[in-house]
């Protein structure tokens, strides 16, 4: 017979063991440590707001080639007058360096043309986020006025394109495969290996001391609260004029100034835009949704005044500009043109 104190002790021991068992079942397992074969990249950027841009995805080269041919072909526009490259020019980092562009018929676009480099890393397309994915945009392109049934009829007579499509797609050339080829090409427009990416991965000599100071300022001023992630932006909406009324001081208003309100008709979306990516930003002037900021110095002044509520000293502006120049990457293994944008 077990005496009372011993019996109590056994009960307590059993309860303790039961509690440990329950805890073990409920506690989540710890995540495995990161696996890497390069000691210079071990979580070097894990706590940073900006992440290195990924390498281009593995895509069917036949489809990429077809998509690029169509991207450059004016026959995809309604009247054959413009191609995608009319506004997205390769020598200008897939922009046209104009405040607004011209669409079919000569009509002016409402917005400044954004670059298509790294477009697949944006969570929405266009300044007001009217399209969620490339397939949606390419199916109903406004600027080219494309009517895909007419495009198909024109291109099917091309003795070179038809057999190429037959090799890339079992169904051959259709409206769907024309669109898919262009989208596949656009998915290939990734610009990895910027100097700042190399810095994030552990190469501290990839950027200068001035550029590194610019990055610290970028974080300390709060720029990284909107411009973060692999695309240094492009993953959220934000109002232009958080601290001061930008549009009241820069009137009169155009329809495009309404921003996302044009899509949602919600008052809270008035003057709200998709935050642009800062990748290759030194090569894509002018800036803002209407191209009103002609260079980096001008757009930094706008961001400081209207988004941060402060004037950024010239000394800091120069260092911020130096940092932004480190975000220019490579396309197909070659550095993008480091055209001055100061």
Image (tube, rainbow, N blue to C red):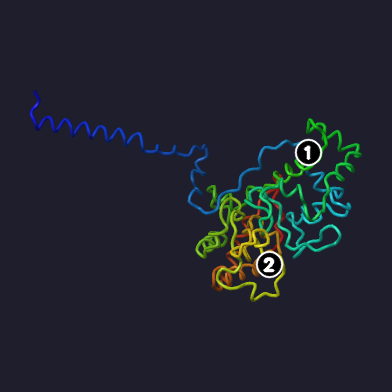
The spot of residue 151 in percent (x, y) is: 86, 45
Image mark count: 2
Residues 330 and 286: in front is 286
Q: Secondary structure at mark 2?
A: helix
- State the residue position of label 2: 257
Q: Which disc, if any, is residue 27?
A: none
Residues 226 and 331: in front is 226
Which quadrant would residue 8 be assigned to in this image?
top left
Quadrant, the N terminus: top left
Name the residue: 52% across, 65% down: 221
Name the residue: 73% across, 62% down: 112
- State the residue position of label 1: 177
Q: Earlier in the sequence, mark 1 or mark 2?
A: 1
In this view, the residue farthest toward the front is 265
Name the residue: 81% across, 53% down: 144
Quadrant, the C terminus: bottom right
The spot of residue 152 in percent (x, y) is: 86, 42
The reply to whether callout 1 and callout 2 are in contact (CB within 8 Å) is no
Drawn side of residue 308 relative to residue 119, left or right: left
């Amino acid at each position: 017979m077990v005496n009372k104190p011993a019996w109590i002790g056994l009960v307590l021991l059993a309860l303790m063991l039961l509690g440990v068992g329950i805890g073990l079942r409920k506690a989540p397992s710890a995540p495995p440590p990161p696996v890497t074969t390069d000691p210079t990249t071990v979580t070097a950027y894990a706590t940073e707001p900006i992440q290195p841009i990924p390498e281009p995805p593995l895509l069917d080269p036949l489809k990429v080639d077809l998509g690029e041919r169509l991207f450059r072909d004016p026959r995809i526009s309604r009247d054959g007058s413009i191609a995608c490259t009319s506004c997205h020019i390769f020598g200008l980092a897939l922009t046209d360096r104009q405040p607004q562009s011209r669409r079919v018929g000569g009509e002016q676009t409402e917005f400044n043309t954004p670059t298509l480099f790294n477009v697949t890393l944006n969570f929405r397309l266009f300044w007001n986020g009217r399209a969620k994915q490339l397939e949606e945009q390419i199916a109903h392109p406004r600027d080219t006025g494309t009517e895909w049934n007419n495009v198909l009829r024109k291109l099917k007579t091309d003795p070179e394109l038809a057999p190429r499509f037959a090799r890339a797609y079992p169904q051959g050339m259709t409206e769907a495969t024309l669109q898919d080829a262009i989208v596949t090409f656009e998915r290939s427009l990734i610009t990895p290996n910027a100097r700042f990416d190399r810095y994030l991965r552990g190469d501290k000599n990839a950027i200068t001391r001035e550029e590194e100071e610019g990055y610290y300022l970028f974080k300390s001023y709060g720029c990284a609260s909107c411009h973060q992630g692999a695309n240094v932006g492009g993953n959220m909406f934000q109002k232009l004029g958080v601290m001061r009324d930008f549009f009241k001081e820069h009137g009169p208003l155009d329809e495009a100034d309404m921003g996302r309100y044009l899509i949602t008709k919600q008052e809270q979306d008035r003057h709200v835009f998709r935050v642009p990516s800062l990748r290759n930003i030194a090569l894509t002037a002018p800036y803002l949704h209407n191209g009103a900021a002609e260079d980096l110095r001008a757009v930094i002044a706008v961001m400081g005044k209207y988004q941060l509520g402060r004037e950024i000293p010239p000394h800091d502006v120069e260092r911020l500009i130096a940092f932004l120049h480190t975000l220019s990457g490579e396309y197909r293994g070659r550095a993008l043109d480091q055209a001055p944008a100061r």
